[in-house]
Image (spheres, rainbow, N blue to C red):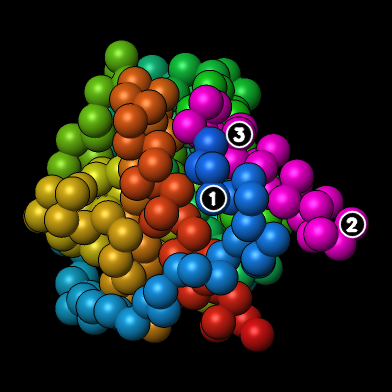
Amino acid sequence: MKTVSRKKIIEALKDQQNIFGDYLFEEKLTSSKNYYEEIPPVVEVIREPVEETVNLFEDTDDWKNAKTLDELNNLIKNCSKCELHKNRNNFVFGSGNPDADVMVIGEGPGAEEDKQGLPFVGRAGQLLTDILKAIKFERNEVYIANIVKCRPPENRTPLPEEMETCIPYLKKQISLIKPKMILCLGLTAAKGLLRKKESLTALRGKFFDYEGIKVMVTFHPAALLRNPNWKRDCWEDVKKFRKMYDEILK
Ligand code: URA
């Protein structure tokens, strides 16, 4: 076995171990092949009709004309359009590379995110960093945002009206960043962005189309912390995601 192959295998194993813990795959231990090699090509891309989000409020703000993420953040960070603003410590706009090819979309800030004003900085965030690393993305290479920008009380799922009010901000972020691919974490992100009503089981691991951007839905890292048995399926999803990325950007 060549030294370079062994080094690659060790790196890949360490990355897998970060998300799988004891669930390391033996074939990865012995294989000297590129570890994305055995993934079948992904061909299923489902085109979604893009519905206009219902405008629930008289919107006279000029954030729609923002030319940069910073400008957008400044124009919306004091938002009080839904109830969630009342209990927030910080408006969690999003963070990462403004020119990212990949966006990651979660549900909404938790306690730690609300405290720091940054997305995915708690335990689920650490797992997200590890998942990204396992498919060779640095966290600061992608852009991370949420469906709602303020923390729902007790970390409950955002209400439909809260989502409808906040999603236009996310859509504006997407239009400024222009990613090639989006990874939706969990059902709330999938429902919010793709207007889907199916279960996560039905949606995960497939590619959908949002305005020409390839979107994949997979498990939310918080769900993986609660149920580590899902990590294996998540790993299959994100490997496909990486493979598609490599195909698109080659
Ligand atoms: N969960 C999310 O969906 N988003 C965050 O930013 C943190 C936890």
Q: Amino acid at mark 2?
A: Thr
Q: Quadrant of the N terminus?
A: bottom right
Image spot of residue 17 (x, y percent): 60, 34
Q: Disc 3 versus disc 2: distance between alpha carbons?
A: 21 Å
Q: Is residue 105 visible?
A: no
- Nearer the viewer's eye, disc 3 or disc 1? 1
Image spot of residue 218 (x, y percent): 35, 50
Q: Amino acid at mark 1?
A: Glu
Q: Amino acid at mark 3?
A: Gln
Mark sitting on residue 3: 2
Q: Is residue 227 above or below residue 99?
A: above
Q: Residue at x 54, y 50 (%)?
A: 27
Magenta: main secondary structure equals: helix
- Quadrant of the rendered structure where residue 225 is? top left
Q: Disc 1 versus disc 2: distance between alpha carbons?
A: 18 Å
* Element on which disc 3 rests: helix
Image spot of residue 116 (x, y percent): 62, 24
Nearest the camera: 91 or 207?
207
Q: Residue at x 10, y 55 (%)?
A: 197
* Element on which disc 2 rests: helix
Dot placed on the residue nearer the N-terminal end, 3 or 2? 2
| Residue 3 lies in the magenta stretch | yes
- Magenta stretch? 1-23
The residue tagged 3 is 17
Q: Residue at x 33, y 82 (%)?
A: 43
Nearest the camera: 227 or 114?
227
Q: Is residue 247 above or below residue 101?
A: below
Q: Disc 3 versus disc 1: distance between alpha carbons?
A: 14 Å
Q: Residues within 10 Å of mark 1 (few under 14, many from 20)?
A: few
